[in-house]
């Protein structure tokens, strides 16, 4: 499973990786990402037995049956093609993707009509279908392991803001790197209203 971009999108893609594990319990699954994210991936996916592999390792030397690109640029997809991986699943959105991936889905993520997590789950479902797994299980939420020191620091910060940590609260982070459309302030307000 390849996710070559930043931490936020990688975190949103983790339910797709867990979905693959639940539906392919015997598979050897590796998550290919930036080396700086390996410790985070290892801590979050340890119980799901997903290996963490970085781009600065010789990842192309592994003998993979399936390459799932949740996000990759063309040199990575080309490497998967040249490696001879039989099933290469990705989003069909750029001209090169129709050449380098032999399975996939038409996705226009820049339109931001669904979340990054949903796009990733759709591609994970496509992998299961391609492997003949018709009885797919629903994705489960990923629970992030608690870091006691960071948790105490967060509680202190919340108290300074006047937020009681025992009461449910919502944090909305509208930041993005600019690769897709951002939703409007009105849409963020709708997210908040739906949560209430």
Image (cartoon, grey):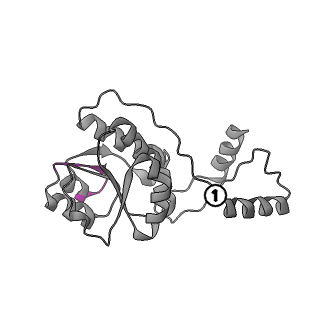
Which is nearer the eye, 137 or 175?
137
- Residue 60: image quadrant is bottom left
Tell me residue 146's x, y (percent).
62, 54
Is residue 126 among what the camera can see? yes
Which is nearer the eye, 125 or 149?
149
Residue 157 position (above or below residue 143): below
Tell me residue 159's x, y (percent).
83, 59
Left or right, 109 with respect to 99, comes to right
Left or right, 9 with respect to 165, comes to left
Residue drawn at x 70%, y 59% is: 151
Which is nearer the eye, 181 or 156?
156
How many other residues sit within 10 Å of disc 1, few (<14), some (14-19) or many (≥20)? Answer: few
Q: Mark 1 points at which residue?
A: 173
In the picture, the quarter occupied by the C terminus is top right
Residue drawn at x 46%, y 48% is: 47
Left or right, 94 with respect to 35, comes to left
Q: What secondary structure is found at the residue carrying circle 1?
A: loop
Which is nearer the eye, 87 or 188?
87
Residue drawn at x 35%, y 42% is: 124
- Residue 74: image quadrant is bottom left
Is residue 111 among what the camera can see? no
Per the image, is 19 magenta?
no
Tell me residue 7's x, y (percent).
49, 62
Q: What stretch is highlighted in magenta?
A: 86-96
Residue 33 position (above or below residue 20): below
Tell me residue 103's x, y (percent).
23, 45
Residue 47 position (above or below residue 182): above
């Amino acid at each position: 499973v390849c996710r070559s971009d930043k931490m936020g999108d990688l975190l949103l893609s983790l339910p797709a990786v867990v979905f693959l594990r639940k539906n392919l319990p015997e598979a050897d699954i590796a998550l290919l990402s930036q080396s700086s994210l390996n410790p985070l991936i290892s801590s979050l996916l340890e119980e799901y037995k997903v290996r963490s592999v970085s781009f600065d390792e010789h990842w192309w030397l592994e003998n993979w049956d399936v390459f799932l690109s949740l996000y990759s640029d063309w040199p990575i997809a080309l490497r998967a093609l040249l490696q001879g991986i039989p099933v290469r699943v990705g989003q069909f959105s750029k001209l090169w993707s129709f050449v380098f991936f032999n399975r996939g889905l038409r996705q226009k993520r820049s339109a931001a009509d669904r979340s990054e997590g949903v796009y990733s789950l759709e591609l994970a479902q496509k992998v299961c279908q391609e492997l003949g797994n018709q009885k797919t299980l629903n994705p489960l939420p990923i629970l992030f392991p608690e870091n006691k020191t960071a948790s105490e620091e967060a509680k202190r910060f919340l108290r300074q803001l006047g937020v009681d940590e025992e009461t449910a609260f919502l944090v909305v982070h509208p930041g993005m790197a600019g690769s897709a459309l951002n939703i409007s302030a009105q849409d963020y307000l709708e997210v908040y209203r739906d949560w209430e």
